[in-house]
Image (cartoon, rainbow, N blue to C red):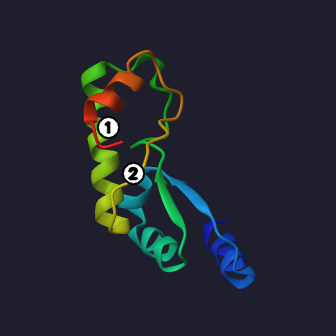
Amino acid sequence: GFWRILNLFKEKELPATVYAVGMALEKNPAAGKAMVDAGFEVASHGYRWIDYQNVPIDEEREHIKKAITANIRFTGSRPMGLYQGKPNENTRSLVVEEGGF
């Protein structure tokens, strides 16, 4: 999976943007470091890979904060944007509310 693709991209000197899920970075910090070391852009794909259609607004707000924190902790930088998978009617306003994008 990930390590094979990472090595292939490095071998071919290909640039990449990786949409990293915050919880995945927490569970595999070596992957976050490897992405940065390879020169990849690490974008945020939210905190969990779930359908946010029926997630309460306060929980989604907390997930956005956790996603940003994970990105900073495991890649060394704040994400330039956030692509929350399967957003709902609150997602856009929560991202604006967060203010860092």
Q: Are marks 2 and 1 in contact (CB under 8 Å)?
A: yes
At horizontal 65% and vertical 70% (from top left) the residue drawn is 15
Whether residue 9 sits left or right of residue 60 in the image: it is right
Badge 1 density bin: few <14, some 14–19, many ≥20, Cα 10 Å: some
Quadrant of the rendered structure where residue 55 is? top left
Q: Earlier in the sequence, mark 2 or mark 1?
A: 2
- The amino acid at mark 1 is His
- The spot of residue 54 in percent (x, y) is 42, 16
At horizontal 38% and vertical 18% (from top left) the residue drawn is 90
Whether residue 31 sits left or right of residue 96 in the image: it is right
Badge 2 density bin: few <14, some 14–19, many ≥20, Cα 10 Å: many
Quadrant of the rendered structure where residue 71 is? bottom left
Residue matched to label 2: 22
Question: Residue 97, which numbered label?
Answer: none
Query: Mark 2 and mark 1: span between their CA atoms?
Result: 9 Å
Q: Is residue 57 visible?
A: yes
- The spot of residue 43 in percent (x, y) is 48, 53
At horizontal 39% and vertical 43% (from top left) the residue drawn is 47
Residue matched to label 1: 63
